Amino acid sequence: MSNNQDSGVVVNGQNNTVTSDLVWGTADIGRVINRNPRQVFHLISTGALKSVQKKGGRYVASRSALLKELGA
């Protein structure tokens, strides 16, 4: 028997509290910082977004680190 507790947090279609702060992909990162994916890629490639890392071929960042980096 498993102990399933509903935390109400859905990340990438899964209920997961550990990764609830992570934002995957330029489209989702763009939604957080109000930019389109191409603008996000430009910011990453010029070094303007230091909190974004590339893991397994995808960009990932902490939502709180993005907002903190941009002064929000």
Image (cartoon, rainbow, N blue to C red):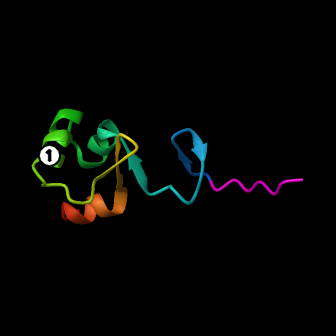
Q: Three-letter amino acid code at disc 1? A: Ser
Please state the total of marks drawn on the protein image: 1
| In the image, farthest residue toward the right | 1
Residue 28 highlighted magenta (yes or no): no
Identify the residue shown where x is 18% and y is 33%. 38
Q: Which residues are magenta?
A: 1-7
Q: Nearer the viewer, residue 17 or 44?
A: 44
**Quarter of the figure with the C terminus:** bottom left
Identify the residue shown where x is 25% and y is 66%. 68
Which of the 4 image quarters holds residue 71? bottom left
Task: Say if 3 sits above or below 41 in the image.
Answer: below
Does 27 sit left or right of 43 as displayed? right
Q: Nearer the viewer, residue 33 or 16?
A: 16
- Residue 20, horizontal then vertical, whole percent: 50, 55
Identify the residue shown where x is 84% and y is 54%. 2
- Main secondary structure type of the part rendered in magenta: loop
- Residue 45, horizontal then vertical, whole percent: 14, 46
Q: Mark 1 sits on what residue?
A: 45
Does 24 sit left or right of 37 as displayed? right
- Residue 14, horizontal then vertical, whole percent: 60, 43
Task: Mark 1: give few (<14), some (14-19) or many (20+) Cα within 10 Å.
Answer: few
Does 50 sit left or right of 27 as displayed? left
- Residue 22, horizontal then vertical, whole percent: 42, 54
Instruction: State the SS at label 1.
Output: helix
Identify the residue shown where x is 61% and y is 52%. 8
